[in-house]
Image (cartoon, rainbow, N blue to C red):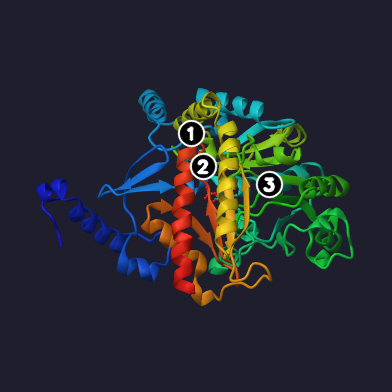
Amino acid sequence: MTYSKEQLLTNTEGLTSELSDLDKKHLIHPVAVPKHHASKGPKIIFSKGDGINVKDLNEHTYIDGVSMLWNVNVGHGKKELADVAHHQMSKMAYSSTFYGYGNEPAIRLAEKISRLTPGDLNTVFFTSGGSESNDTAFKLSRFYWQLKGFKDKRKIISLRRGYHGVTVSAQRATGIDAFRNFSGSTDPDIVNAKAHLTECELGDKTHPEYSGCIRSVIEELGADKIAAVIVEPIQGAGGVHVPPEGYLKAVRALCDEFNILLIADEVICGFGRTGEMFGVSHWDITPDLMSIAKGITSGYAQLGGVVMNDRVADTIKEYNDILPHGFTYSGHPTACAVGLKNIEIVEREGLVKNAYKMGKELEKGFTYLEEKHEFFTNPRTVGLLAGFDLMKDPVVNIPFDSSVQAAVSVVEECYQRGLLIRCFDFEPGMNIVAVAPPLIIQKQEIETIISILDEAMTAFSQKVK
Ligand code: PLP
């Protein structure tokens, strides 16, 4: 059906219907079921946002319980960010950072990042997002070793349930089979360790998962073949997994022992999400390279980067030929201006501290839900990066049958009640729900999220009993 312009202006249902038809015809959506989408169209067509809330075309309001894709950290509708983008765009459409060209926002943002990041992570290579950052981190790690005369040090070790993006190398580093294997793409130099955040990294060779841990992969492949290990300080899209105490320090020590670089993928954790400016700060470690994106602009513009320590940067800075790597939008002036203003907001509004404080409120709410609902288990919150599991019998570890679609059902119940959250069920028996609202959230809003989850859990329990 088509609508006249007048009808479209007055009839939002008509607009929704028209856009839905156009979407079905002309768009393939990322991480959606194409066949389902081609017949049903988009679930929500968003039109605007304010604070922690977003609206669709029909003015239905939803709480953005995962900050869209864990990125809208300062919340929606920050006019200051629109203004700074407008101002920068009005001055100059775009300028490249290729061929040694510079622009003020990129230079100032790089300097600002170097002051925020721990240790001597002082030098930035800008990208347009997280996947590009990780591919760049892999390439720069390999390049570093080439420059040092170790041409065979090429392999990158990543972890089970790590998520690093969808460019080919980032895809292969991702430890979620569906993503890792999609389209049969390969990168023979990426090796996925099979153990999952176990204490065996501390060196216990009798640990049942020892043969799949990073140390055993290093022993098997030989450190002379390995360029870097990549870890998320807290795994996000793999299901919000917090490493055991001592784990990241042990991985740092392992990398030092075997002369391997450590890459921290801070794409989700970075810029305050976990109640620290960066996720690694919870465990007091400094990686050699850090991938950043998402929270650097709170999603208001596309930007990512790799931050290098002096050891890596100084070696690259000695290279006396063209560096054949870079993206058209590396150091995009508008994105960098937005990044600078976004960090200013994060600091001015004390959002890192707020993430910590509100994380504690969320934790209290999860404790209440765990006590009340028998299927709600294993809650974890680090700042405003939070998750929980759904199990048929948490006491003896019996998962729901996959036909129950437990996590999908709870997320759907929340959606019906105006709360958008995410679930992960990519492994048999896995039913994980993630909650990661904007860092500006206030106590009352956390309480609303908990009360919606409470109702959703009750509805789900009634369905499965
Ligand atoms: N790394 C992590 C930890 C992520 O969560 C993501 C995206 O969710 C990426 C990398 C990929 O980032 P992008 O989608 O911007 O390429």
- Whether residue 292 is visible, yes or no, is no
Q: Amino acid at mark 3?
A: Pro
Q: Residues within 10 Å of mark 1 (few under 14, many from 20)?
A: many
Q: Which residue is mark 1?
A: 332
Mark 1 element type: loop
State which tag comes first along the sequence, 1 or 3.
3
- Whether residue 449 is visible, yes or no, is yes
Cβ of mark 2 under 8 A from ligand 1:
yes
Q: What's the distance in space between the residues labelled 2 and 1, CA to CA?
A: 8 Å
Across and down, in percent, residue 44 comes to: 33, 55
Q: Residues within 10 Å of mark 2 (few under 14, many from 20)?
A: many
When the figure is inspected, residue 392 is found, relative to residue 158, above or below; the finding is below
Cβ of mark 1 under 8 A from ligand 1:
no
Residue drawn at (47%, 65%) of the image:
408
Across and down, in percent, residue 345 comes to: 50, 27
Q: Amino acid at mark 1?
A: His
Q: Which residue is mark 2?
A: 128
Q: Residues within 10 Å of mark 3 (few under 14, many from 20)?
A: many
State which tag comes first along the sequence, 2 or 3.
2
Q: What's the distance in space between the residues labelled 1 and 3, CA to CA?
A: 27 Å
Q: Which residue is mark 3?
A: 233
Across and down, in percent, residue 57 comes to: 26, 49
Across and down, in percent, residue 275 comes to: 62, 37
Mark 2 element type: loop
Cβ of mark 3 under 8 A from ligand 1:
no
Are dots 2 and 1 in contact, CB under 8 Å?
yes
Foreground pick, 422 / 123: 422
Total marks shown come to 3
Numbered circle sitting on residue 240: none
Front: mark 2 or 3: 3
229 left or right of 353? right
